[in-house]
Image (cartoon, helix red, strand yellow):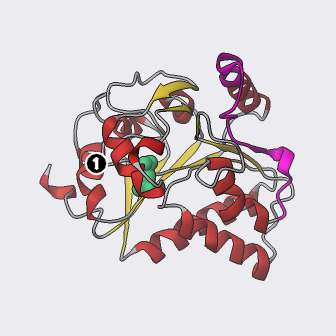
Amino acid sequence: MPIEVSIKKGYDEISKRAAKIIADAIRNKPNLVLGLATGSTPIGCYRELVRMHKEEGLDFSRVVTFNLDEYIGLSPTHPQSYRYFMDQKLFNYVNIKRENTHVPNGLSDDFQKTCEEFEEAIKKSEGIDLQLLGIGTTGHIAFNEPGSPFDSRTRVVNVSEQTIKDNVRFFKSIDEVPRQVISMGTGTIMEAREIILLASGAGKADAVAKSVNGPVTEEVPASILQTHPNCTFIIDEAAASKLESI
Ligand code: PGA
């Protein structure tokens, strides 16, 4: 199944489109199991979901969420932790129940167990209905970097040098960027029933083109999405600018 590509003018448009898909899915199934992503790209989508909650009564009271990843060593209140990010960008401003939100625990004393319990919790919820993704300049999805096995599950991974460089903008210095994360595996992500991937800006154009038009290879982790039965890339014109050239 080729990846469906929806090209919008700019960042606002991709954010609104993604939020509308998520909102419709929640209205259709109030106990939706929603996979969430962090990073700069989904912020506009979360802002729009908060607006829909406030102005249109979009109801998160039965929604269950699973986040893709968390930095090892950062507490839930650390400003760069992904739990903190989710609280600040979405959870604190909608009526979601905290116990229904799952972000891997970056301070666990048994990471193997944390990863197994995370996978178990997804299974108990009967799987992820709709997974939101970003894409890294390396073509990564979550922290599944080039070379990650397509059948990987939630586990501890080392962050690649490129991704450390890409993420340093959120930290005071490169030394503060954590070197390890807990990340959902590519195999875990692929089990979601529907996937939407957001990309904005020319910096993502190469990764997008390789993922959509290139060969399916572990060297481009997002290329596996070509084999998913229901995956849409919602991208702006800049991120789409290299699509024909591969
Ligand atoms: P970004 O990150 O949204 O901050 O560009 C996306 C990703 O690395 O998956």
Closer-to-camera residue (55/114)? 114
List the residue tagged with mark 1: 207
Instruction: Judge whether residue 48 is colored magenta.
Output: no
Looking at the picture, does residue 201 appear above or below residue 193? below
Query: Is residue 2 something one can see in this rendering?
Result: no
At a point 40% along the width and 35% down the height, the residue shown is 227
Locate residue 203 relative to residue 105 in the image: left or right. left
Residue 132 in view, yes or no: yes
Looking at numbered disc 1 in the image, what kind of residue is underneath it?
Ala
Vertical arrangement, residue 132 with respect to residue 188, above or below: below
Q: Which is more toward the observer, 177 or 69?
A: 177
Residue 217, x across and y down, in percent: 28, 29
Residue 48 spot, x, y in % from top left: 62, 74
Classify 10 Å Cα crowding around label 1: few (below 14), some (14-19), many (20 and above).
Answer: many
Span highlighted in magenta in the image? 95-116
Report whether 132 appears left or right of 83: left
Q: Residue at x 29, y 32 (%)?
A: 216
Q: Position of residue 130 (x, y in %)?
A: 62, 48
Horizontally, is 220 left or right of 246 in the view? right
Residue 106 included in the magenta stretch of the image: yes
Residue 239 higher or lower than 147, as above or below: below
In the rendered image, the vertical position of residue 121 relative to residue 166, given as above or below: above
Q: Residue furthest bottom?
A: 55
* Mark 1 secondary-structure assignment: helix
At x 32% / y 65%, what residue is drawn?
A: 201
- Snapshot quadrant of residue 55: bottom right
Marker count (numbered):
1
Among the 4 quarters of the image, the one containing residue 87: bottom right
Query: Is the N terminus in the top left, top right, bottom left or bottom right quadrant?
Result: top left
Residue 124 position within the rendered picture, expressed as x and y whole percent measured from the top left: 79, 29
Say if disc 1 is inside 8 Å of ligand 1: no
